[in-house]
Image: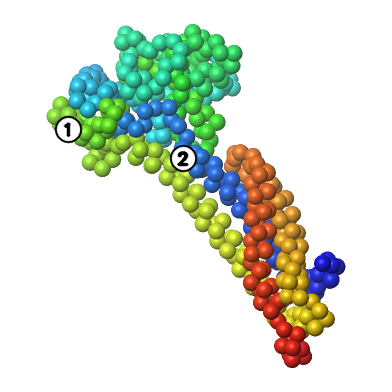
Amino acid sequence: MQIQPILAALRQHKAGTVLIALQIALTLAIVCNALFIIHQRVTHLSEPTGIDEANLFVIGNQWADQSSAQQVDAQMQADLATLRQLPAVRDATASNSYPLVGGGWDDFITMTPDQVQKTTDASVYFGDTHFLDTLGLKLIAGRNFRPDEVAPMSPHEVVTPPVVIVTRALADKLYPDGSALGKSFYAMSATPTTIIGIVARLQRSEVDTWSRPYAYQALIWPRRLDGTVGTNYIVRAKPGQLEAAMREAKQGLIAQNRMRIIDPKDGVLSFAQVRHRAYDSDRGTAILMGIICAVLLVITGAGIIGLTSFWVGQRRKQIGIRRALGATQRDILHYFQTENLLIAGAGVALGAILAVGLNLWMMKQLAMDRMSLLYVLAGVVVLLLLGQGAVFAPALRASRVSPVEATRTV
């Protein structure tokens, strides 16, 4: 089919042609980046934490009376002893935080005491000798804490402990040559701390976008946080006994000491609930982006259908003349499909440039990752197919215009 007559016809409808091409370009730019964001968010939802999520639950405990730090520490030890004795419980520990909860302590790590710029960040967890077993962490090098290394600490008097357990990601960041075990670094203090153990994986407490480069950089201090305002008990149930353990744990703590507050709705949460809450925003963003993509594609398809239908109505006389001169129904159908392909082609070419530009802007302003060109390629294919699909019905209707019917409108 000759392209020149089609281009000549499009020059007679410049406004409509330009508007549809721009609509396709904007749709491509937005849809490509939206799909990239959706993929990132959905992938984020399933990121492993490195802990035994299937058998873990947490208890948010607040104290109902005023007690000294020493009394609270003794009560916490009594609580943990109670939890560990429950039939459905494998182990329990107390900590300042846990993966995916949000917030928590963030450590400013350097390799020398006078270093101004940080080497990296890491999430800080307080844990006793039961911390590794309770969370189901895999110790791949070194050893666990000894009981004499675990001590209480006030949040108002932060003192870096002499020994620490770190994740493999943090160890590799500090010592890329693999020699981290037994080496030291500095964390918020001029006193060095020595790495005595390395665990395979432990996700940090935050799930925000800014923390993702440090997602598995975490460390464990052999400390029990002064829990005068409350504490988090992390409990690991025996396999298949999670519900029973959650029920027993709350009853056991209340029986041990009634002077506590455990929220009836949010006080005891399985880790499945923790994960669901942590990624609510990611899930909502993915759904919203999906809706935006669907709406944009529908609007673009509707615009192509409307414009092509309008052009068919305007060109009935021309179509009739072409049919009278021997053009077949297939020729008319191919004419409009080719016309749409030219418009869509111009639109996706401009849209590809806009899509890459938008991604570069978001990388700079929102710290997003670079989008793969596969998203742009997929978007181009989708928009071209959408254009052909949208133009098919009006083009088919145009191909059925008979020469006699068209000439009668002269």
Q: Position of residue 378 (x, y in %)?
A: 65, 50
Q: Secondary structure at mark 1?
A: helix
Say left or right for 173 vs 158: right
Q: Position of residue 190 (x, y in %)?
A: 49, 13
Residue bearing mark 1: 251
Q: Position of residue 401 (x, y in %)?
A: 70, 81
Residue type at mark 2: give it: Leu
Q: Nearer the viewer, residue 399 or 56?
A: 399
Q: Quadrant of residue 81?
A: top left
Residue type at mark 1: give it: Gln
Q: Nearer the viewer, mark 1 or mark 2?
A: 2
For the point 79% across and 70% down, which residue is it? 10
For the point 22% across and 28% down, which residue is it? 88
Residue 65 visible from this viewpoint: no
Say left or right for 58 vs 51: left
For the point 23% across and 22% down, which residue is it? 84
Q: Is residue 78 above or below residue 27?
A: above
Q: Are marks 1 and 2 in contact (CB under 8 Å)?
A: no
Crowd band around label 1 with a 10 angstrom C-alpha radius: few (<14), some (14–19), many (20+): few
**Rendered-image quadrant of the N terminus:** bottom right
For the point 61% across and 38% down, which residue is it? 369
Q: Nearer the viewer, residue 397 or 18?
A: 397
Separation of residues labelled 1 and 2 (CA atoms): 32 Å
Q: Nearer the viewer, residue 180 or 379?
A: 379
**Rendered-image quadrant of the C terminus:** bottom right
Residue 377 visible from this viewpoint: yes
Q: Position of residue 2 (x, y in %)?
A: 84, 67
Q: Mark on residue 45? A: 2
Say left or right for 16 vs 130: right
Q: How is the image coloured?
A: rainbow
- The numbered mark, 1 or 2, whose residue comes first in the sequence reads 2
Q: Quadrant of residue 259?
A: top left
